[in-house]
Amino acid sequence: MNRGGAETMIMNLYRKINRVKFQFDFVVFGDKGDFDEEIFTLGGKIYYLKTNSTIKRMYLLWKLLRENKEYQIIHCHTNFSNAFHIISAMLSGVKMRVAHSHNTSDFSRNIVVSYFYQPISKFIINRFSTHFMACGEAASKFLFYKNKKVIVLPNSVDVNLLADIGISNKNYINRLYENINDHIKIIQVGRHVPEKNYIHSIKIAQELKKRNIKFKFFIVGRGELDYNLKKIVKNLGLEKDIIFLGVRGDVPHLMAGSDIMLMPSLYEGFPVVLVEAQAIGLKCLISTSISKEVDLNVGLVKFLDLKENIGKWTDELISSIIVQEEDIDLRVHKIKEEGFDIGSNAVFLEKFYLN
């Protein structure tokens, strides 16, 4: 339960759902995470089933559910791996098995994965799940068959809270760092993994440097590419311009203090952070590899093809940060109207679980 997109969405719902009537307990297949303490505070349990063996993982989950008959619903958020957990739940007698799709692609260079594992997993998910849910239409089409009735539950946020943060924290970064009032402040938030395409963003920073444009680029998150990314930044002489912030609890405040967010991803599901950014009022320059659904029609998202050269991306970044007068109330209303308010979606999920 680290600060990833799906995890953040689940926590948003957990905070808002009626916890007198409903309790979320968590099965994770890794180490302790960033949200663990909050989960315990909210009354939740976490079961850590850490093993490299898929068969053992299925057995441990089956055993857990057999020994804890109080669990009436299992809600799976692990894309193709949902197949193993759905099977375990079915064999242990859990009658409501929800498969949730959070991605629009899962590219693998491994032929076995692409041509055997993924199709078989997809078949199992579609055959043995009792309910189907997705963060958007594109994610639904990716994991589920066309004839399945899929509930789209948008990756929602606390719109009013984020709008207030956007208003009151415009100087947040300026207060943290001296003498950068006249700098362009760029932010990218996400795991440090290949699909997030941080190399592309670093190339944009390099181009800004060549043009003698003052900027600070804040990279928020962590992941397998940490060391390599920092090494590249150092080799390019950009250590003073690109700041690695690691995992933070003040991401909305950092976004509020930024001028623009970059997301040149190779693929995404429906990133919660893009919903947060638009609720805050932050401009976003993102790749066309990301579903058009992420644009909430509030004039803050600009799409650009990754085939365009770095000069074009840099030009678009500079032109996008021109300050425009905005109607904050209208923005909040539109985002809620699009179905991205966490309060409404928590109520919807309560009714779904009860039914």
Image (tube, grey):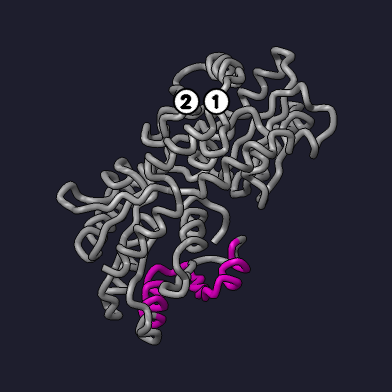
* Residue at figure coordinates x 45%, y 68% from the top left: 18
Q: Residues within 10 Å of mark 2 (few under 14, many from 20)?
A: some
* Residue at figure coordinates x 31%, y 60% from the top left: 99
Horizontal side, residue 216 vs residue 293: left or right:
right
Which residue is label 2 attached to? 299
- Measuring from the top left, give residue 58's x and y in whole percent: 37, 73
What is the span of residues highlighted in magenta in the rendered image?
35-64
Residue occupying the far left of the picture: 147
Residue occupying the far bottom of the picture: 67
Which quarter of the rendered picture does the C terminus lie within? bottom left
- Measuring from the top left, give residue 65's x and y in whole percent: 37, 80
Horizontal side, residue 224 vs residue 79: left or right:
right
What is the CA distance from the residue labelled 2 to the residue labelled 1? 9 Å
Tell me: residue 185, above or below residue 333: above
Horizontal side, residue 242 vs residue 127: left or right:
right
- Please state which amino acid type lies under the numbered disc 1: Glu
The image quadrant of residue 238 is: top right
- Please state which amino acid type lies under the numbered disc 2: Gly
Q: Is 51 included in the stretch rendered in magenta?
A: yes
Q: Nearer the viewer, residue 246 or 58?
A: 246
Which residue is label 1 attached to? 326
- Residue 156's mark? none
* Residue at figure coordinates x 37%, y 36% from the top left: 293
